[in-house]
Image: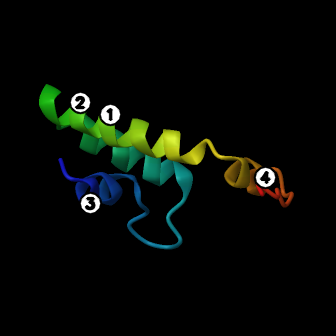
Amino acid sequence: MTENDFWQLVSRSQAAQDEQSLVAALTQALSALDNQQLAEFDRHFSTQMRRAYTWPIWGAAQGKSVNVF
């Protein structure tokens, strides 16, 4: 699974797609993957989660500006 494949799975298929529909589509797609593909998905997911653990992202999530310099 490439990073592009990962983003295709976790991205909304249309701008108005609600969370429940997105979760259902992701669940269906993941259930069709073999163990190797699931491991690759997990690797990409873990990479993106680590990238999200930064002060600017946490500040944005809390609605605050965080000066990291």
Question: Residue 4 bears which disc, if any?
Answer: 3
Identity, as a three-letter code, of the amino acid under mark 2: Ala
Q: Which SS class for mark 3?
A: helix
Residue at point 17%, 47% (across, down): 1
The Cα–Cα distance between marks 1 and 2, rounded to whole angstroms, is 5 Å
Q: Which SS class for mark 2?
A: helix
Question: Residue 42 bears which disc, if any?
Answer: 1
Residue at point 76%, 57% (across, down): 60
Please report whichever mark, 4 or 1, sits nearer to the chain's N-terminal start: 1
Kindly indicate whether the residue at mark 1 contacts the one at mark 4 (C-beta within 8 angstroms): no
User: In the image, which is nearer the foreground, mark 2 or mark 4?
Assistant: 4
The Cα–Cα distance between marks 2 and 4, rounded to whole angstroms, is 31 Å
The Cα–Cα distance between marks 1 and 3, rounded to whole angstroms, is 14 Å
**Does 28 sit above or below residue 13?**
above
Please report whichever mark, 2 or 3, sits nearer to the chain's N-terminal start: 3
The Cα–Cα distance between marks 4 and 1, rounded to whole angstroms, is 26 Å
Identity, as a three-letter code, of the amino acid under mark 1: Asp
Answer with left or right where residue 62 lies relative to residue 36.
Answer: right
Question: Residue 53 bears which disc, if any?
Answer: none
**Residue marked by disc 2:** 39
| Residue 23 visible | yes
**Residue marked by disc 4:** 59
**Does 53 sit above or below residue 12?**
above
Q: Which SS class for mark 1?
A: helix
Q: Could you say where residue 3 lies in the image, as x and y percent from the top left?
A: 27, 54
Q: Is the C terminus in the top left, top right, bottom left or bottom right quadrant?
A: bottom right
**Does 56 sit above or below residue 26?**
below
> Quarter of the image holding residue 46?
top left
